[in-house]
Image: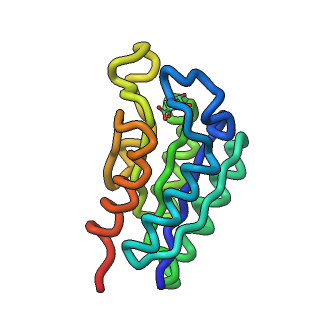
Amino acid sequence: MKTILVLNGPNLNLLGQREPAQYGSTTLQDVEAMCVEAGKRLGVAVKCLQSNHEGVLIDAIHEAGRGVKAGSVLGVVMNPGAYTHTSIALFDAIKGAEVPLIEIHISNVHARESFRHHSYISAAAAGIVVGFGVDGYVLAIEGLVRKFHKS
Ligand code: DQA
């Protein structure tokens, strides 16, 4: 069974308590449980990781890339948080690791402040899910499976 890595970036550990009007009241633990459930339904294993540190996220993308090459990993679903708007290093990591990655944002970043309108990640992503709340994680997993899983 192939594995999907669900990667969450900075401040997403605060989901549920952080700006609930923007991000809802579901906790990260609940989101991760939803992802594991979606994986079961779709026949993939789901592994989850959250970090507030750019280098940890980069290392996880590199490892996922090695897994893709070895045939054990299908790809990555990632909410890069604010690194979306700042991190050329994450763009380079996704490109360098050649890992299929779906970018997900809980909120509709395009309807918010202008500094959230540009993503360094999108040009390296295989697909983007924006503005569906935490359901977006499940939609992103489903999209990754539909696009890349050969059964
Ligand atoms: C976010 C949107 C980003 O702009 C923000 O910095 C986040 C969360 C989202 O899921 O809507 O941390 O990625």
Return the x and y of residue 100 as percentages of the image width and height: 40, 63
60 is higher (above) or lower (below) than 44? above
Task: Pick the quarter of the image with the C terminus.
Answer: bottom left
Return the x and y of residue 26 as percentages of the image width and height: 55, 39
- Of residue 134 and residue 95, the one placed in the foreground of this image is 134
Return the x and y of residue 11 as percentages of the image width and height: 66, 33
Q: How many marks?
A: 0
The scheme the figure's colours follow is rainbow
Q: Is residue 41 left or right of residue 58?
A: left
Q: Is residue 133 left or right of residue 70?
A: left
Q: Residue at x 62, y 45 (%)?
A: 28
- Of residue 121 and residue 145, the one placed in the foreground of this image is 145
55 is higher (above) or lower (below) than 71? above
19 is higher (above) or lower (below) than 122? above
149 is higher (above) or lower (below) than 80? below
- Farthest residue, direction top: 113
Q: Residue at x 31, y 51 (%)?
A: 127
- Of residue 85 and residue 151, the one placed in the foreground of this image is 151
Q: Residue at x 52, y 84 (%)?
A: 70
Q: Is residue 31 left or right of residue 119?
A: right
Return the x and y of residue 10 as percentages of the image width and height: 65, 37
Q: Is residue 7 left or right of residue 99?
A: right
Q: Residue at x 55, y 46 (%)?
A: 90
